[in-house]
Image (tube, helix red, strand yellow):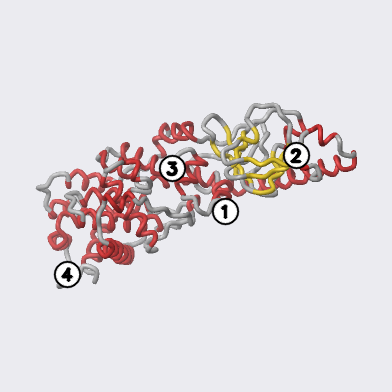
Amino acid sequence: MVSDDAHFRVYNPGEMLIRQGHSDQSLFIILTGTVNITEGAGGTILAVLKAGDIFGEMAFLTDTRRTASVVARESVIALKLDRVLFEQLTPEIREKFKDKIIEKMVARLDAANKEMSRLNAALSAGSPEPFKPVGRHPGLSITDSPEPLLESGRELVRKIISNTAALPAMPEVMIKVQQMVKNPATSPAQLAKIIEIDSAMVTGILRVANSAYYGFRGKVATIQHASALFGTRRLAELITAISAGGVLGKSMDGYGLKAGDMWCHSIAVACAASEISAAVGSDSPDIAYMAGLLHDMGKIILDPYVRERKVLFDNYTATHPKKTLQEAERDILGFDHAVIAAILCENWNLPRSISFGIRHHHQPSSAGDHQLSHIVHLADYFTIQAGVGATGTAFYQELDESSRSLVTLDPDTLNAAVEKARQYVENLAGQVSSP
C-alpha cells in the first residue's frame, strides 16, 4: 500500500479530512500530526487522535455514513486508503488488514468497558446524576458509531441551569454578611452578632485572632474583642472565608482536587485580589475579595461532568501540554467553569460586577477595562505561579498581558500581595478546622 505515494495526503491546520453525514468510505492512518474528531454544527470535540491512530474504519468496513467530522489540528500527513485500492490487494493481505482493524476495535471496546465500570463505581459513590451508558465512549477514536454522545455546549448548559436543585446554596451566614457590608454604617460588633451563637465559627475566628499572623497584643478571648480588633472589612472577610469552607472544601475527583484544596486556593486568590485592589486605590477591596473567593465555583458544578469525560480530559492534557484548563473545558464541554460560576453568582443575587469579573477572569482582555476582571486574573495567575494553594490536575497557565497595563503595579507590590496571600492561607488553614 505505501509503495503508491499517490495515496499519501497532506492536510493543513483546520482542513477537513472527513465530513459528518457524507458517504465516502476511505480509511485513514495518521503518520504525523493530530486531528480532532468533532460532532454537530458547533464542532464539539469528541477525541483527539495522533500519529499511529486509525479512523474512518467503520464506514470503510460497513458502508455506513460518517457520524462525525475529522479536522486537522495542525499539519497532518496521512495514508488514505479507499475501497478501490483495497480491492486491488491480494485476498490474504485484505484479511490480515481487516484482522488488524478488528484487533484495534476489540482493544477500544475493552478500554471502554473498563472505563465505564470505573465511572459507574465512582458515580454510585456520590454522583448527583446516574451514568447513562452510551454506544460510543468519548475517549475512543472510532468515528462511525451511530449512538449519541454525552451532552455538551448549549444542551449541557441548559441541563445544568434547569437542574437548580443541584446548584449549591450560598451559606446563610455569607448572605447575611454580604447584605450587611453593603451598608457603610455596619459596625464590627453588628457583624459579630450574627455569628456569636455559631461556636465553630467563633472558635475559628478567635484562633486566627490569636495567631502570629495578626500579632494582636494580649489574649483575644471574646468575639466582641476580636471584632473590634479586626474591623468591619477584615472580620467580614474572615466570616466569608470560613463559611465558604462548607461549599469549597469538598474533594473533586474530576479536577484532581482533594478535600480542602479548592478552599485553600480560593482564599489565596481572595486575599491577593483584595491586596491588589487596595494597592491600586480601589474603594472596593471587599468586592475583589468576594470575586477571588468564588472565581472557581463553577468547578463544583462541572466536576461530575468532567469526571464523566475523564478519558477525554486526560487525552487532551497529554496531547496539548500548552493548552489551559479552560481551553480543555471549552473544547470538550463547549464552555468553561467561569461561565457556570457567573451563572451561579447571578443565581445567588450577587453584584453584577462580581459575576462579570468571574466570567472574564481567565480572559480579562475580553472584558475591556473592567478592572475587577483583571485583578482576579492577576491574583489567580500569580498565586498559582507561586505555588500558593493546590490547583489539582496540572494545566498550562497563561497570563493575559493586558492586565499588566490596566492594573499598574510594580513587581515588588505584586510580590508582596502574593506573599501576603501565602501567609493568609497558612494561617487560616492552620487555625481553622478543615472545611
Res 336 label: 3
| In contact (CB < 8 Å): disc 2 and disc 3 | no
Q: Compared to 39, does 316 lie above or below?
A: below
Q: Earlier in the sequence, mark 4 or mark 1?
A: 4
The residue to which callout 2 is attached is 7
Quadrant containing the C terminus is bottom left
Q: Residues within 10 Å of mark 1 (few under 14, many from 20)?
A: few
Say whether residue 26 is left or right of residue 314.
right
| In contact (CB < 8 Å): disc 2 and disc 1 | no
Quadrant containing the N terminus is top right
* Of marks 2 and 3, the one in the foreground: 2
The residue to which callout 4 is attached is 216
* Of marks 4 and 1, the one in the foreground: 1
Q: Nearer the viewer, residue 242 or 363?
A: 363
Q: Which residue type carries mark 3?
A: Asp
Q: Which residue: 54% across, 34% down?
A: 43
